[in-house]
Image (spheres, rainbow, N blue to C red):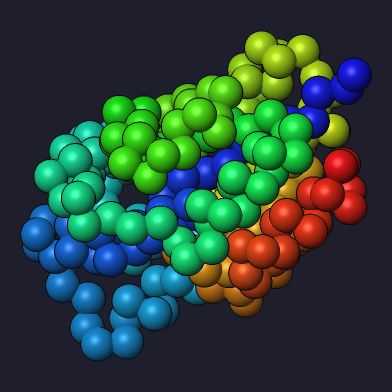
């Protein structure tokens, strides 16, 4: 029987992390003006880095600090409404689920354990390079020995679409995360969904 593999981003896709990102940015000395936070949602991560004037060489350091900050506030992080049900439905319908994230695997597992969702995922992989997800996606596909074009990657950012395309996967963009629907559409994902319930319907129709 052919394996049906769906991979997910975590931050902004499964968990509501945008408030954590904003509070972390403020703690690090970045104080966006009122309305500027919404403007950031219309920018790719590379554009956000440029807008906040973060030197490229500092990105790994900031990523590490964000993971540490996230760990401290993880008790306040909640899942996107409806995502737990969507994940449970897909798992129950026989899909193999995995996570490829820029967050740390320990942070992700902590929240999944709290929400009783750990058993729904066969693999959780963390990629320290925020622009290196394609490599992680390729590694996961090879591990499961499936054809890349049969695998979907679900994410909330332009870089998730780019990573999926580079890895030869199909992409689904969700509009409730970091990037706005406008910029997500401009990145040409294979599908866009506006509520978690649409994920179950999409995958049951496409590969169920």
> Residue drawn 41% across and 39% down?
116
The picture places residue 175, in percent across and down from the top left corner, at 58, 69
Please state if 57 lies on the left or on the right of 85 as rendered.
left
Establish if 93 lies above or below 158. Answer: above
Q: Is there any visible trace of residue 67 in the rendered image?
A: yes
Residue 6 or residue 158, whichever sits in front? 6
For image coordinates 32% across by 87% down, the residue present is 35
**Residue 32 placed where, x, y %?**
22, 76
Which residue is farthest bottom?
34
- Quarter-of-image position of residue 195: bottom right
Q: Would you say 23 lies left or right of 63 here?
A: left
Q: Is residue 86 left or right of residue 82?
A: right
For the point 40% across and 71% down, which residue is it?
40
- Residue 49, by quadrant, is bottom left
Residue 47 can be seen, yes or no: no
**Does 36 sit left or right of 86 as displayed?**
left
Image quadrant occupied by the N terminus: top right
Q: Residue at x 19, y 40 (%)?
A: 71
- Number of on-image labels: 0
């Amino acid at each position: 029987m052919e394996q049906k593999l769906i991979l997910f981003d975590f931050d902004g896709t499964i968990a509501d992390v945008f408030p954590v990102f904003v509070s972390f940015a403020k703690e690090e000395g970045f104080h966006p003006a009122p309305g500027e936070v919404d403007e950031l949602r219309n920018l790719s991560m590379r554009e956000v880095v440029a807008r906040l004037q973060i030197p490229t060489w500092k990105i790994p350091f900031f990523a590490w600090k964000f993971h540490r900050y996230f760990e401290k506030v993880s008790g306040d992080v909640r899942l996107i409404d409806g995502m737990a049900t969507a994940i449970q439905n897909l798992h129950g319908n026989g899909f193999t689920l995995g996570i490829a994230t820029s967050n740390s695997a320990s942070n992700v597992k902590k929240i999944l354990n709290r929400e009783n969702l750990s058993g729904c995922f066969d693999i959780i992989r963390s990629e320290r390079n925020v622009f290196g997800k394609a490599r992680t996606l390729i590694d996961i596909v090879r591990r499961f020995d499936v054809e890349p074009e049969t695998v979907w990657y679900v994410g909330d950012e332009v870089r998730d679409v780019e990573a999926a395309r580079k890895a030869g996967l199909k992409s689904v963009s969700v509009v409730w995360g970091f990037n706005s629907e406008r910029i997500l559409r401009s990145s040409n994902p294979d599908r866009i969904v506006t509520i978690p319930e649409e994920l179950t319907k999409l995958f049951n129709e496409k590969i169920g």
